[in-house]
Amino acid sequence: MLQHDDTTPAQPDDEAPTAAPNGEQFASNPDEPLVMDEVRVDPGVALSVPATLALRKEVLPICRLNGEVVIVCADIEDVATQRQLKQVFDEELNLVVADPESLRRALKRVYGSVSSSRGRSRNTQGVESEDAVAICDQLLQAAALRNASDIHLVPNETVLVAKLRVDGNLDVVSEIPLDMHGAVVSRIKVLAGLDIAEKRAPQDGRFSNRMGPDQTKIDIRVATLPTRFGERVTMRLLGGLAGSISLSKLGMSDADLSVFKRAITRPHGMVLLTGPTGSGKSTTLYAAIGELLRTDSGNVITVEDPIEYEMPEVSQVQVDSADKIGFAKALRSILRHDPDVVMIGEIRDLETAEIAAKASLTGHLVFSTLHTNTAAGVVTRLADMGLQRFLIAATLRLAVAQRLVRQLCTHCRMPRPLAAEEATFLGRTDAAGATIYDARGCVYCAGSGFIGRVALIELFDCDEDVSRLISSGAGEEDLISNARERDRALLMDDAVDKLFAGITTYEEVIKAVVVW
């Protein structure tokens, strides 16, 4: 129970905030101040509090957990501040003492670029009184805090629902009154250079914004779509991560990393990434380029649609939506600029595939992406496009199939035995009873149970024997059998390894990997 001073009436016992964290929610010693540097903050909770109050009183709501709002603070006995927080939140408050220095850093990270007009309490001036500029800025700030890849604004009959795609999942972050719908959409259209008067046709645009505590420049693609209840808006956030991407952070095993590095350091050939949209293919290619630039100052040129990350020392070409410059046309021009490495955003047709293959034959290292289910499927996909098999055999150096799964929070993950039916579904009947982990939720992961994502990787590297198989017309099943004979891990193998290592959950594995 909190201690109250003599001048302030004490709250009734059933309304007093909880003062001590329990071991289930807090993995650290509950008697020690919480260090905020590793704690994830839920912007939907944090931005409910006025920035002026949070900064002045050094309080920071970080998440909702077990029906309570967890609030870290410098002074756990400041009853006046507790009353103000009670006006903002209907739920019980769980007050936690934080390390002062790390709390100040967290406050700067959350509220540093937020104006004092945002986050008003519901009992004073709610979102109804916020203007469109403030609402849009707050959404962008929330996206930066959660490392979101997309912002969705979806109108329904009663409200405009704002959602963030975080680690592949779409989460509701706020509900905006419907009478603000038109103003918010118009604000975004102005930023993206769209026609604010056109409401019955889809539009596409883009703008740049500086976000986060470091004010990193982010490119934002905007798409509008008329729906039954008005225009919906989707914003894709691009860039800002290029400097922090490295191959060692992608989740490859040591053996796979060695094979991958060997392929990207060859003087010529094709390295192709495959997987569904949103599986991290472009991120892996950028990491590969970054690795090359750290060891060699070669001439790197990319053709992308769109440019997702800005990279220094790289010439990046944007494919024009009006078809003034497509992948094939850009490639033909690029080859006259003496590149060492060429990255193509995607091989979409035979013309692009032929130019890429011929570029690799003439001494260039070519990176690109395709859409197939397996790494070996790259061969059959290129052949189906019409690329001759002898060209595939002569140029393909490595194919990489990739999926993304959410990574468990190590502070709160819960061990349990793998059930017999689960082991059977994974094709590992002898693994029944092995220890795996489920997500739970704590302050370190903002109650989600997960922190970030990790890649599942399948490599198909080509040597002389594989090249002969490709030239002879071997199908995908034959190529997969060859990979198994060479002890290459398939997607399911890598997924099971990460499951037993406690990196991800059974549910994430099943969602990401197709079990034949």
Image (cartoon, rainbow, N blue to C red):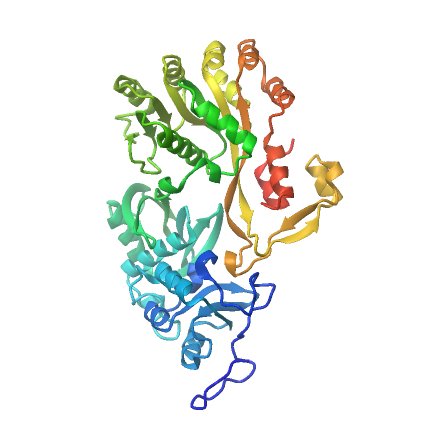
- For the point 32% across and 65% down, the residue is 118
Where is residue 328, by image quadrant? top left
Where residue 431 sits: x, y (%)? 73, 39
- Up the image or down, 233 lies above or below 333; here it is below
Please tell me which residue lies in front, 270 or 66.
270
- Up the image or down, 416 lies above or below 42; here it is above
- For the point 32% across and 36% down, the residue is 311
Residue 322 in view, yes or no: yes
Please tell me which residue lies in front, 161 or 456.
456
Q: Is residue 376 left or right of residue 104?
A: right
- For the point 50% across and 84% down, the residue is 11
Check the image and name the residue furthest to the bottom: 6
Where is residue 464, by image quadrant? top right
The quadrant the C terminus occupies is top right
- For the point 30% across and 25% down, the residue is 299
The quadrant the N terminus occupies is bottom right
Q: Is residue 39 left or right of residue 495?
A: left
Where residue 470 sits: x, y (%)? 54, 13
Where residue 151 sits: x, y (%)? 39, 50
Q: Is residue 185 left or right of residue 405?
A: left
Q: Is residue 200 left or right of residue 431?
A: left
Please tell me which residue lies in front, 171 or 409.
409
